[in-house]
Image: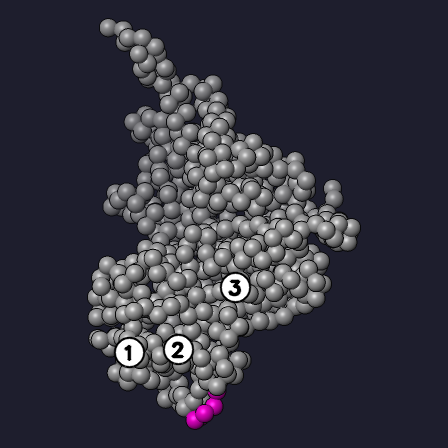
Amino acid sequence: MIRLEKRATPSKQWSLAAPLLAVLLTMIAGGFMFAALGKDPVEAIRLIFWDPILGEFADYFRPQLLVKAGPLILIAIGLSLGFRAGIWNIGAEGQYIMGAIFGAAVGLAFYPAELWIIFPLMVIAGAVGGTLWAMIPAILKTKFNTNEILTSLMLVYIAQEILKSMANGLLKNPEGHGFPGSRNLAHYSASSNPELIAGTGMHWGVVAAFIAVIAAYILLSRHILGFQIRLTGESPRAARFASVRPNLLIVICMGLSGGLAGLAGLFEVTGPAGQITDKFNVGYGFTAIIVAFLGRLNPIGILLAGLLMALTYIGGEMAQLQLSIPAAAIQAFQGMLLFFLLAMDVLTNFRIRFGREAA
Amino acid sequence: MKSVKSILAGATLALGLGGAAYAEDPLKVGFVYVGPIGDFGWSYEHDQGRLAVVEHFGDAVETSYVESVPEGADAERVLTQMALSGHDLIFTTSFGYMDPTINVAAKFPDVKFEHATGYKNADNVSTYSARFYEGRAVLGTIAGHMTETNQVGYIASFPIPEVIRGINSAYIHAQKVNPDVEFKIVWVYTWFDPAKEADAATALIEQGVDVIMQHTDSPAAMTIAEERGIMAFGQASDMAQFGPTARLSSIIDDWAPYYIARTQAVIDGTWESTSTWDGIKEGMVEIGEFSDRVPAEVQAEAQAISDSIVSGEYHAFTGPLNKQDGSVWLAEGETADDGTLAGMDFYVEGVEGDIPN
């Protein structure tokens, strides 16, 4: 008989091995799925995991990995701080949208002026937009004790409606022939967020993501706030004795995650995406939740998880293009990754025992 | 580190040389779809066009596609991927791919791009769209005859000229055969969202509508119409299987003739950047079979409108027509010019409500 026995403390080794094992199991299960669809599984896995990094056109795709991973990492870092303290901001997608709208609105207000100050102002506006949107669930929680999971998630849908309204109204390109969508911010040099070094994919958003990883690492390992976050998550009772003010912590964590999500939105709308459109958001805010957990809520882990996630997107497109694998199968493949990771978590927290339970 | 520009330049050079050296190689044609090919609407019909290309050319072409590509940064990457992997002709089948198409086309001057429904051309970027409003004139005629409550529901996607043209054309022709007809318009701000489209259909039915027209891509409204025992029209594809009783007719997008012609042009070396706007005559807009539910004389009348549009005797926007505010748009016998139609941002007289902005 097999049974699970709870570990006194989560296993360090399993915590590190679980993501690797999850990736391996995803490859195997995904391979079976591709084979069932009549596609060569080995070729498909190679296209997804190998070609974007070392394949024929990797010179183009490696930088694209950073472009795709940048917003995921930036958002996931913010989310991980709250998650560690048991504060569940599920609405990063909405904060991402609001950051983009705030930042784009500032940039468009100056159009067509060419001043160096415009872009920095937009960055600030982006962070403010995301933070303010995250403050709604934060204040609702601290004042009325509402569940932030629900309120932050519901606010995503409100943000999407605001985005549609902006793309079709206030921020619509007056020269756009009536089609929804703002002016292209990437085509207007004062507001554009270009590649900083040609051919690297590095734009300000990727730089910000790297800074966030380092800052979060220092915060969690060296700073009193990081200590309070960890303590609150691990032992809320002990945290109270250690004079942690829970409401303040909620406001700080929600604000930080919202601000970083807002920044990600701003960098995306000024760079890779270019315009505010009704479909500007493509789910980075939700995917970042997966990235945060895939990275074990650890800054370095999140960095790697973000890159891995980006790889499955870009490689998935290659598999679609070259093997005609349906998009839904690629999404199922990404879903498997999270599924197996969560399943592997059992091994981190439990020990598998064979035989009868001792009396 | 090598710059992307030089890599891309190298890649395009290689493509150019490759084309000359291996003329026997199949032509690679790529398609980018905004929805899943199983949407039974917009993307489905573009994929049908792709399959027609495969059937027509056989081994002379090799096609590939990527579905559900978000408009924006992701589209740009997918297009680059296609160009890098040696595609000679790429169809980008959604309006939102406009800027990405232009951006990528600038980096790959030897690759031909075809962008659906946009307005930006370049030396290697053509645009193409269909005169769906011609089809709506036919469906509007049927709707006007068939409604018993005199309430026609219209599920509209975005307040852009194409959709407004469709509403106007359908209304003008419904009103011509039934002066009491009213249109109830719901804006759903999506091209494909079965849940929202179903909600819109339900809301319209609650308001007394008994015929539904739609300018969104899923068969959700058709399914609701079937359940609730009212009438509807297929959109983009025939949708007969979703509303065997409810369906009266349909507007079918038929991209096959265009896709075959453009592929042939690349093979022949005669491809040029063009702006195409084809209608029923060229076969880009097709009217689905009329259901038996539509009386013979209505069928004949609808067919007559379609025939007169094909022959060029009749234009779907022929005066006298006033704008919603009562001001004169087209005088007796005058027809609308393409420029006005392309930028149409007003309702014709009789349509109620405001165009949202």
Q: Is residue B229 left or right of residue A200?
A: left
Looking at the picture, tell me which residue is in the foreground, B196 or B144: B144
Task: Name the residue tied to disc 3.
Answer: B255
Residue B332 is one of the magenta-drawn residues? yes
Residue located at (37% from left, 51% from top): A156
Q: Do the residues under discs 1 and 2 have CB atoms within 8 angstroms?
A: no
Considering the numbered disc 3 on the image, is that residue within a helix, a strand or a loop? loop
Q: Amino acid at mark 1?
A: His
Q: Residue furthest top?
A: A359
Rendered image quadrant of residue A51: top right
Whether A207 is drawn above or below A29: the answer is: below
Task: Name the residue tied to disc 1.
Answer: B145
Q: Is residue A187 left or right of residue A97?
A: right
Residue located at (70% from left, 50% from top): B25
Residue located at (40% from left, 74% from top): B136
Residue B291 is one of the magenta-drawn residues? no
Q: Amino acid at mark 2?
A: Gln
Quarter of the image for the N terminus of chain A: give it: top left
Task: Name the residue tied to disc 2.
Answer: B303
Instruction: Give the main secondary structure of the magenta stretch.
Output: loop
Residue B248 image offset from top left, x and y in percent = 32, 68
Tell me how far mark 3 sits from mark 1, CA to CA.
30 Å
